[in-house]
Amino acid sequence: MGSGIAQVAATAGHDVLIYDNNPQALKRTSEKLQKILNRLVEKGRIDDPTAKAIFGRIYFVEHMSSFRECGLIIEAIIEDLNIKKAVFEQLEDLVPNDCILATNTSSLSVASIASACERSERVIGIHFFNPAPLMKLVEIIPAIQTSDTVLAEAKKMIDSWGKLTVVTKDTPGFIVNRVARPFYGEALRILEEGMADVPTIDWAMTEIAGFRMGPFTLMDYIGNDINYKVTETVFKSFYYDPRYKPAFTQKRLSEAGYLGRKSGRGYYDYAEGAVNPKPKKDKALGQNIVDRIVVMLINEAADALYLNIASSDDIDLAMTKGVNYPKGLLKWADEIGIKNCVARLDELHSEYLEPRYRCSPQLRRMARDGETFFLVKVEI
Ligand SMILES: NC(=O)c1ccc[n+]([C@@H]2O[C@H](COP(=O)([O-])OP(=O)(O)OC[C@H]3O[C@@H](n4cnc5c(N)ncnc54)[C@H](O)[C@@H]3O)[C@@H](O)[C@H]2O)c1
């Protein structure tokens, strides 16, 4: 992630210093960046002098003491709280007093990382998506210690790099990794119940709902080990809220080494010439699958709004630009009708009697009061 972020910053005209405590990794990063820039030239996206200028603005440094004139540091090291805290503690003594210290963490508490610094008000989360140069969305996460000035400056800076920023509370999964959980979790539940098989669920979610990839294709793409780990981390971080409970199916796949594309096998077989099962293109079944997964996603998005994790605009922007959902989930709720969403969730809840299907108070109140997320009601 670090090299992608460096490329974005250097492309925006900044001098960038990259430090990695593994010199081999630093060398690999330099080669990788050079290769990526060459490819952009070959494809005609940038000209050769521009590529050279971008690469020329990136310096590979051997010590963090080289950061003494930096205005912004974005940490993208291993996802380990104690290691990150140790690095932030060290950084504070090496950089100017007004330097913003940011973390690219996907799952750790920004408040906890910031607590390693004496001037914790200058610490903030700046969460890029992979690959950073291609993904438009960046989540900005002020910790409870972060000052308003640092939040405003960080947001302004990342906006000026051509990114779309959304501000989110410092809670597990921020916006995207929280709201997206049912896309995987409910698909796995449908599979485990035997309501439909893998290709049928993927077919319904792409052909009927309009997602770019079905949940299982996407899990195979991300890697079942990684996707499982994120779900497990979110589940634990929410004090074992059953809504985020991981699925045994994915755990077993991960344990068996069926990690997805990268291992040649996951939910699908990626071996050359492999024949994978075909979807059962039953429209009614497909619609049922879509209704169930989409309403669970809507419930999660509504709950994020209810708990003030982010604004309705930012929640929809995050899901359309961060993970390319075909529509913002709150906009989708308006289209389906809030009352219909509540009815569908209540139906699931009364059938399963499981808290994972409990309707968000946000949706229930809005249904009661006849409100919508975005549509303006016209009185005639
Ligand atoms: N990979 C993703 O899709 C993704 C997306 C968003 C955010 N993130 C976050 O970005 C961070 C990095 O993830 P990644 O996938 O690039 O990891 P990675 O393992 O590919 O890279 C981490 C690098 O940090 C270096 N490192 C480890 N400890 C260090 C230290 N003490 N000082 C300096 N360098 C050190 C390692 O040598 C390695 O090169 C994590 O916090 C992760 O959660 C990752």
Image: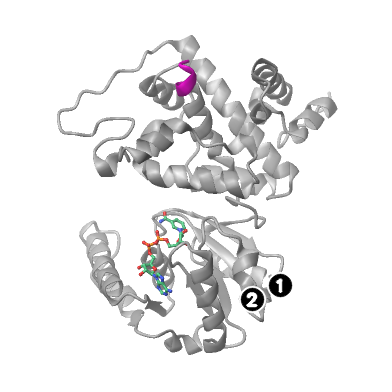
State how the image is colored: one colour
Q: Quadrant of residue 337?
A: top right
Quadrant of the rendered image holding ligand 1: bottom left
Q: Could you tell me residue 299's position as x and y percent?
A: 66, 33
Q: Are marks 1 and 2 in contact (CB under 8 Å)?
A: yes
User: Can you tell me whether the CB of the residue at mark 2 lies under 8 Å from the nearest atom of ligand 1?
Assistant: no
Q: Quadrant of residue 140?
A: bottom right
Observer-nearest residue: 252 or 207?
252
Please give the name of the residue rendered at 46% of the width and 85% of the height, measured from the top-left corner.
Answer: 67
Please give the name of the residue rendered at 27% of the width and 62% of the height, measured from the top-left corner.
Answer: 36
Observer-nearest residue: 241 or 45?
241
Q: Which residue is mark 1?
A: 147
In the picture shown, does residue 214 fall above or below 139?
A: above
Observer-nearest residue: 164 or 340?
340
Res 126 label: none
Looking at the rendered structure, the kind of residue marked 1 is Ser
Q: Quadrant of residue 139?
A: bottom right
Residue stretch in magenta: 191-195
Q: Is residue 4 magenta?
A: no
Q: Main secondary structure of the magenta part?
A: helix
| Quarter of the C terminus within the rendering | top right
Density class for disc 1 (Cα within 10 Å; few <14, some 14-19, many ≥20) is: some
Density class for disc 2 (Cα within 10 Å; few <14, some 14-19, many ≥20) is: many
Q: Which residue is mark 2?
A: 122
Q: Earlier in the sequence, mark 1 or mark 2?
A: 2
User: Can you tell me whether the CB of the residue at mark 1 lies under 8 Å from the nearest atom of ligand 1?
Assistant: no
Q: Could you tell me residue 26's position as x and y percent?
A: 30, 74
In the picture shown, does residue 56 fall above or below 134?
A: below
Looking at the rendered structure, the kind of residue marked 2 is Arg
Q: CA distance from mark 1 to mark 2?
A: 7 Å
